[in-house]
Image: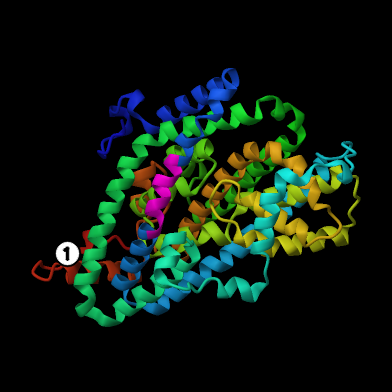
Amino acid sequence: MIPESNEPAAKVPLHRRLYVQVVAAIALGVVFGHFYPSLGTDMKPLGDGFIKLIKMLLAPVIFATIVVGIARMGDLKEVGKVGAKALLYFEVLSTVALVVGLVVVNVLKPGVGMNVNPATLDTRSIEAYTSQAHAQTGGAVDFIMNIIPKTIVGSFADGNVLQIIFFAVLFGAAMARLGARGKPVIDGIDLALQGLFGIVRMVMVFAPIGAFGAIAFTIGKYGIGSLAAYGKLIVAVYGTCLLFVLGVLGTVAKICGVSMWAFLRYIREELLITFGTASTESVLPQMMRKLERAGCEKTVVGLVLPAGYTFNPDGTAIYLTIGALFVAQATGIDLSIGQQLVILGVLMLTSKGSAGVAGAGFVTLAATLGSIPAIPVAGLVLLLGVDRFLNEARAITNLVGNGLATIAVAKWEGAFDAARWNEETGDKAKGSGVSAKWAAKRLSLVEAEEPDTPPAGPASARVA
C-alpha cells in the first residue's frame, strides 16, 4: 500500500499515497460513525491497536537514536549545548502558546452565558481523570526525581520517555568515552535501529485502518451533534491553534529561513495520521526518520524531538488555558487579571508533564484545576463530551511545534543541511549545508566506519 522507494511522488499512483489513504479512511470513519454509532464505537480497538503497535517501538527507537548519535559524535559538550538550547526554545514557545490561548479565550469568551451550577454536575464521569491527576500532582523536586528511573527495564516497560532519554544520554556518553572499543556495540545498536525503522514502515501500512477506527469511535460515541453544542469552544481552540501555527510558528520558520508550507507539505502524512488517531506518539518514529532525511543531524533529532513531547506541548498549552477559563466562564466565575496570571503560572509547570497520548491534556487540566481553588474541578464535566474533538487540534499543533523545534535547534546549532532540506521538501531555503564543525564530525565518522576507504572529497560533506 505504501511505496518505499524514493521516486518522485508524481510517479506514485494516487491511491498508493499514504495521505490519500488516510484522508479516505477518516472520511469513511465519519460517515460510518454517524450512521452506525453502535458499530462505530466498536471500531475503537482498530485505533487503539495501531497506536499500541507504534508505542511498542518508541522506547527502543528513542534509545537507539540517542545512543548512536551521542556515541558517534563523541563531543559531550556539544550534547549539553544542544540540550540547553532545546530547553530554552521549549520554555519560550510553550509560554507564548499559553499566553496566546489566554488572550483568545478572553476575547471570544466561549463559556459566557452557559450559567452552569457546579453543584448540579455529576462528577462520576471524571473521577478516573481527577484521581489520575491527583496521583501526578507534585512539585519541581518530584518532577526531577521522576526522571531518574527505578530500574532500566521499568522505564522501557512503562514507556516513560524522559527516563528513557536520561538513560540513553548516560549510556551514549559512556560509550563515547570508550572510543574504538565501543564501536562494535554502537554498530550493533545502529543495525538494530535500522531494523526497527523497517518495522515502522510495515506498521504504517495499517495507518488508514487505525485512523478509520479512531474517527468512527469518536463520532459514534459522542456524535456530530456535540460539535454544534460546543461550537464556540471548538472554534476557539481550532482557531487559536491555527493562529499559533501560522503566526507564531510561521515566524519561527521564517527566522530559520525555511518555508512553513514546505514543512507542512513534507509531513502531510504524519499530520493526517495524528488527526485520525489524536496522538502524536503514533508518528514519532516516522518524524524522526523524516527530519534526519531532510537535513537535521541525527543527534539533534534524537535529543530534541522526543524531549519536545514532554517539554514543548504547544497545542496542549493552548487547550489548557482555554479549557481552564472556559470552565470558569461557564460556571459564572469572573476571574481578575491577577487570578488569570496565577493560572498562567501554574500552567507553565503542569503543562510540561503532558505526554503525546490522546487524553493526556485532560488529565493535566484536571491537575491544574485541582490546584486552583477559584475554579471548580466539577466543571471538567462540561469538557468531557467535546474533549475528544479538541484532541485533534492540540495533537497536530504539538506535532508541528516539535518538528519545527527540531529544525530551529538544528539551525541554531549549525547542524542543519539546507541543501538536503531543499532536495527533500522542494523548498528554496538559503544556505548549502551544515557548519564546518558538524561537517568535520561527519567526515571523521565516515573515516572511522570505513578505515580502508580514502577520505572523501569536499563534495561528500557540504559546508555552509
Lateral position of residue 275 relative to residue 389, left or right = left
As drawn, 114 above or below 86: above
Residue at image position (79%, 52%) is 377
Q: Does the rendering let one see residue 291?
A: no
For label 1, the SS is loop
463 part of magenta stretch? no
Q: Does the rendering let one see residue 207?
A: yes
Q: Looking at this view, name the residue that lies furthest to the front.
A: 124
- The image shows residue 2 at horizontal and vertical percentages of 31, 34
Residue at image position (38%, 47%) is 286
Q: Looking at this view, name the residue that lies furthest to the top.
A: 35
As drawn, 63 above or below 198: below
User: Which corner quadrant of the image does residue 243 belong to?
Assistant: top right
- The image shows residue 9 at horizontal and vertical percentages of 32, 32
Residue at image position (59%, 55%) is 313
Lateral position of residue 168 relative to residue 340, left or right = left
Viewer-proximal residue among 36 and 170: 36
Residue identifier under label 1: 456
Dominant secondary-structure state across the stretch colored magenta: helix
- The image shows residue 27 at horizontal and vertical percentages of 51, 24
Q: Which amino acid lies under the numbered mark 1 shown in the image of this protein?
A: Ala
Count of picture labels: 1
User: Which corner quadrant of the image does residue 366 belong to?
Assistant: bottom right
The quadrant in which the N terminus is found is top left
53 part of magenta stretch? yes
Lateral position of residue 343 relative to residue 55, left or right = right
Viewer-proximal residue among 126 and 147: 126
**Residue span colored magenta:** 49-59
User: Which corner quadrant of the image does residue 225 belong to?
Assistant: top right
Q: Looking at this view, name the residue that lies furthest to the left.
A: 452
